[in-house]
Amino acid sequence: MVVARRSIAEVDFAAKIDALTYAAASGRARSFAALLHQLPSIYPTEILASLDRLAKRRAISATFVANVRRQAAQNATSIEGRSLLPLPHPLDYEWRFTSDAARLLLNRATDLTRTDGELLLFGTPGLAIEALALPIDRRVHFLAENNCITDRVRSLNRATGSPISIAYCNTGLPFESADAVLLDPPWYPDFVRPMLTAAAHACRRGGVILISLAPSCTRPTAEADRDAAVRFAKRLGLDLIDHNELAITYDTPFFERNALAASGIHPPPQWRRGDLFVFRKARESTRAPLVDTNRRRDWIEISIGRMRLFLKDVNRHDTGEIGLISLVDGDVLPTVSRRDRRRRKVQAWTSGNRIFCTDNPQLLLEAAVSCASMASGSSLQPTLWGSMRERDAVLRVAEELRGLAALEAREEHGDDGTALERSMNWRSNSTSYCDTSTAISSG
């Protein structure tokens, strides 16, 4: 019964997308970029699939669809300068606001609060960086997880005279101290609810909460999830006072750019948009805040240059010597959806959305630590492996990881030569793992 309801919802969603795509394609949206801009933040793969369905029904020209697909496959996007922050990682579900969107949110929060008010930036490092550069006559607080991104925000904050107060989520949540709380949870109910609860807990009565939520065409359940979030906010004592559709623009993170490129798609860099919801706290909430600050407790993070590598199952005692074992062709997972079943097998995951399993997690950990120490100028050598054969295995896997980090650095900068490398094994001794699960490319 649940499967039947899900199938009906997906059919209805496809029909809705087709109607919107047909209207756009019949109007002035005659290119891939124009379709992405005109349609309400529909995922690029969904647009192309919709065009194929419409062409099959002869609702639109097959020649037009072929031209759009040709445009989608052209990598003509210019890559802007690197962010001051470490790269987002797919395990964090982190999409960052564009500079324009960050300024819009900060200005809106300023307009809605008194001059001596307090702004709380909840898990939004991009907003914190923007706040460092803007003349904001409010006290600004940044609350975030204890990770390398927050460490970078701390360093930049110190370099600019520490205008922002910074705290970690695991040190406790503020209580009714903020006049405005700004948050951008991953667009899934199990993230939205606890973060919205914490925001309501931190917001003083009469204060406001600004939150970005998924537009209705993001995935089949997006509209229902969003409506449920508004009802849930009501139970937290929050009244909806404004809703601006597609008001928030996002930069495409490197991991999503790689995922789409693995599918042969190269969209403009700021195609994704979110809906801005503004709530006012009118009543006290009876729900105690619960924020899971250990969402990645099964993973260990190691940085090798700009590449952030997450490792899992590092306490397992296996004896293999291969190290990295491929899970998908080309190693880049061609989706950012957490519904993709291949995610369950991943034991090593890069910030470029490359995924692997391993026959020896400890070997992989030791090799990654060796790489990180060499990148930082340390002379640390492999220590967990006693025999010459074991040490050689660590050094070999470490060399693979350095090659992987170098490849992703070139991809991040938009090096034209990386397109060929994506379609080939980036290491000569790659061991493949065959998987036949179906990819879900949106959401």
Image (cartoon, grey):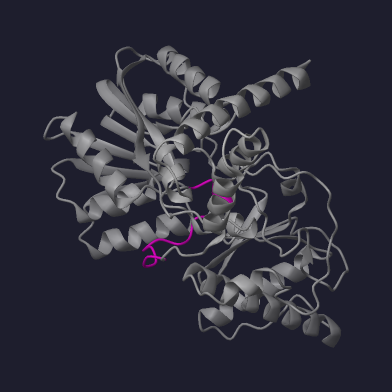
The residue segment tinted magenta is: 79-94
Q: Is residue 378 part of the magenta span, yes or no?
A: no
Residue 296 in view of the camera: yes
Front-lying residue, 20 or 405: 20
Q: Position of residue 152 (x, y in %)?
A: 39, 61
- Figure label count: 0
Q: Position of residue 83 (x, y in %)?
A: 38, 63
Q: Position of residue 316 (x, y in %)?
A: 81, 58
**What is the quadrant of the N terminus in the image?**
top right
- Residue depicted at 72% across the width and 72% down the height: 424
**What is the quadrant of the C terminus in the image?**
top right
* Image position of 286 (left or right of 340): left
- As displayed, is residue 415 above or below residue 53? below
- Residue depicted at 48% across the width and 38% down the height: 25
- As displayed, is residue 16 above or below residue 308? above
Q: Position of residue 150 (x, y in %)?
A: 41, 54
